[in-house]
Image (cartoon, rainbow, N blue to C red):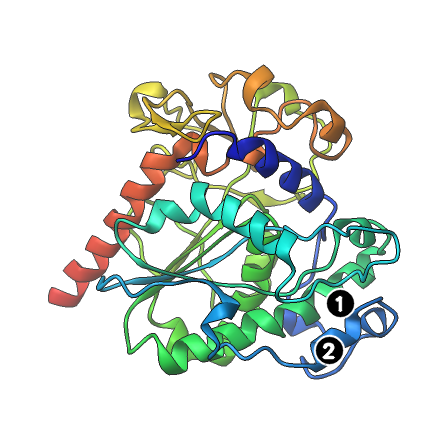
């Protein structure tokens, strides 16, 4: 891991906090081919009229041909930042700033899967955080629903038609990338059951999956242990000082799984169960983060990380609270996540061989 990647990473996370909040799923919205009014009045919204050619490898951050038996498709969080007030609210697919930010986050998140998976990561056009802040809840819902049905869905179409070759796969993301995955799970995967049945898991980290969302999408199932298959893994990490505070990515009714002991209850997992964390410089070190689920809030509470080092900076406190570890949802439990990927793949192999 490279030093000094985290300052940029944290700036990107602050921007992504301005992204969509509570959203409905695709099945509740208009048909995917209907252009919502919010898209029509967005500066740059017309860009989605032009489809991205994902046969062009330049439109991929990563195309994983590493000879592994399992693929992962990774969706990075918000990385587009307008350079001027007059700049479009929607990025171009080749926006240099967005691509640089996506590459930075990729190093500390998607690398979790590198040991066990071929990694595919499409570039996709994003809305700026500044513009997202101005949207109502209804407009936010429509915007995310529509944007997920465009580039991310086109990337999946290309992947399944030309790259998958029948292999089992994993979906993974963080923050707004995870928001996109919730839309893909409720819409795209429901419409393509032949693909969905091959999904090992969806790591929807850094965004809330709620009981309401699961009830509205009975084809989806939340993980209950370390080795179940075809499930959603989700959690948001906070320190004790965030209890009762507003957090932009924590939604009422959120459910979580403990990334150390892989339990859904309040069973405490101390640091001895942590196989390795990323420090502030992105280096893998001895695990220093404990974990316990706060059932009422629906988050994972870490009491051993130093908030002065790992909490979101004070300038984002109004969005995340004083002890949000949103920037380190992957990093605090890095080695355990990596091991869990291996565990779930092994469970699939054992089930296939049985």
Q: Quadrant of the N terminus?
A: top left
**Element under disc 2:** loop
Q: Is residue 274 left or right of residue 34?
A: left
Res 32 seen here: yes
Q: Is residue 50 above or below residue 318?
A: below
Res 354 seen here: no
Q: Quadrant of residue 250?
A: top right
Q: Is residue 241 left or right of residue 194?
A: right
Residue 120, numbered circle: none
> Is there a contact, CB below 8 Å, between mark 1 and mark 2?
yes
- Write the residue at 56% across / 35% down: 327
**Element under disc 1:** helix
Q: Is residue 178 left or right of residue 331?
A: right
Q: Is residue 25 above or below residue 21?
A: below
Cα–Cα gap, marks 1 and 2: 8 Å
Residue indicated by mark 2: 30
Q: Quadrant of residue 42?
A: bottom right
- Write the residue at 28% across / 71% down: 167
Residue 316 percent across, percent down from the top left: 73, 31
- Write the residue at 65% across / 65% down: 125
Instruction: Return the disc, 1 or 2, that comes first in the chain's sequence.
Output: 2
- Write the residue at 44% across / 40% down: 108
Residue 133 percent across, percent down from the top left: 82, 49
Residue 339 percent across, percent down from the top left: 27, 41
Considering depth in this image, is 321 or 301 the residue closer to the camera?
321
Residue indicated by mark 1: 142
Q: Quadrant of residue 138?
A: bottom right
């Amino acid at each position: 891991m490279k030093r000094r990647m985290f300052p940029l990473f944290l700036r990107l996370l602050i921007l992504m906090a301005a992204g969509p909040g509570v959203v409905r799923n695709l099945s509740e919205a208009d048909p995917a081919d209907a252009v919502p009014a919010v898209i029509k009045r967005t500066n740059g919204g017309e860009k989605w009229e032009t489809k991205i050619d994902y046969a062009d490898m330049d439109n991929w951050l990563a195309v994983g041909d590493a000879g592994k038996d399992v693929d992962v498709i990774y969706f990075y969080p918000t990385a587009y930042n307008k350079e001027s007030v007059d700049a479009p609210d929607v990025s171009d697919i080749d926006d240099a700033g967005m691509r640089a930010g996506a590459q930075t986050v990729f190093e500390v998140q998607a690398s979790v899967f590198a040991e066990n998976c071929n990694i595919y990561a499409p570039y996709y056009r994003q809305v700026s955080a500044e513009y997202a802040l101005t949207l109502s809840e209804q407009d936010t819902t429509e915007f995310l629903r529509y944007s997920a049905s465009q580039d991310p869905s086109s990337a999946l179409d290309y992947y399944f038609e030309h790259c998958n070759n029948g292999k089992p796969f994993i979906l993974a993301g963080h923050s707004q990338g995870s928001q996109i995955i919730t839309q893909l799970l409720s819409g795209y995967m429901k419409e393509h059951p032949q693909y969905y049945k091959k999904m090992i898991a969806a790591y929807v980290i850094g965004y809330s999956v709620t009981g309401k969302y699961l009830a509205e999408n009975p084809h989806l199932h939340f993980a209950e242990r370390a080795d179940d298959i075809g499930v959603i893994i989700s959690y948001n990490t906070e320190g004790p000082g965030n209890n009762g505070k507003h957090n932009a990515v924590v939604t009422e009714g959120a459910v979580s799984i403990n990334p150390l002991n892989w339990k859904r209850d309040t069973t405490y997992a101390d640091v001895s169960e942590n196989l390795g964390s990323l420090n502030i410089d992105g280096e893998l070190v001895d695990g220093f983060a404990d974990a316990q689920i706060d059932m009422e809030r629906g988050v994972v509470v870490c009491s051993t990380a130093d908030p002065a080092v790992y909490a979101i900076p004070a300038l984002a406190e109004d969005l995340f609270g004083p002890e949000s570890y949103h920037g380190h949802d992957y990093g605090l439990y890095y080695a355990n996540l990596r091991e869990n990927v291996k565990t779930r793949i092994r469970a699939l192999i054992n089930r296939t061989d049985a």
